[in-house]
Image: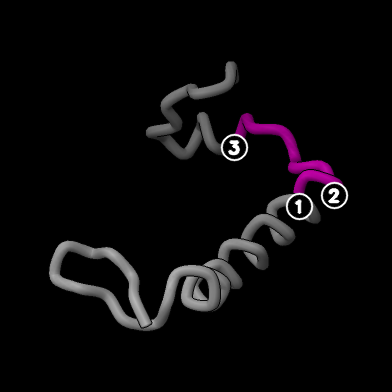
Amino acid sequence: MPPGAHIDTQSKADSLSAVPSDSKEFTHEVQRVNQEFPSSYQLLFGKDRCSCGFAFD
């Protein structure tokens, strides 16, 4: 399947190749970093937000 292909049937899903282990590791690292963002943003931009969304302390 080409990148971005629409996988809408089980037969298309079954024809996909296995995900390489280095891609799995990369995905897990991206997820870990994304989970750390909220607390990092709070430290960088303040813990309170006004109604417009800007952070302040």
Mark found first going from the N terminus, 3 or 2? 3
Q: Where is residue 22 in the image (x, y as percent from the top left)?
A: 85, 47
Label annotation for residue 14? 3
Q: Is residue 23 above or below residue 53?
A: above
From the image, state whether disc 3 or disc 1 is nearer to you.
1
Q: What residue type is labelled 3?
A: Asp
Mark found first going from the N terminus, 3 or 1? 3
Q: Which amino acid does label 2 sit on?
A: Ser
Q: Which residue is drawn at 37% across and 83% down?
A: 57
Tell me the SS state at disc 2: helix
Residue annotated with mark 1:
24
* Residue range of the region highlighted in magenta in the rendering: 14-24
The reply, left or right, for residue 37 in relation to residue 6 is: right
Q: Where is residue 24 in the image (x, y as percent from the top left)?
A: 76, 52
Residue annotated with mark 2:
21
Q: Where is residue 8 in the image (x, y as percent from the top left)?
A: 38, 33
Q: In which quarter of the image is the N terminus?
A: top right
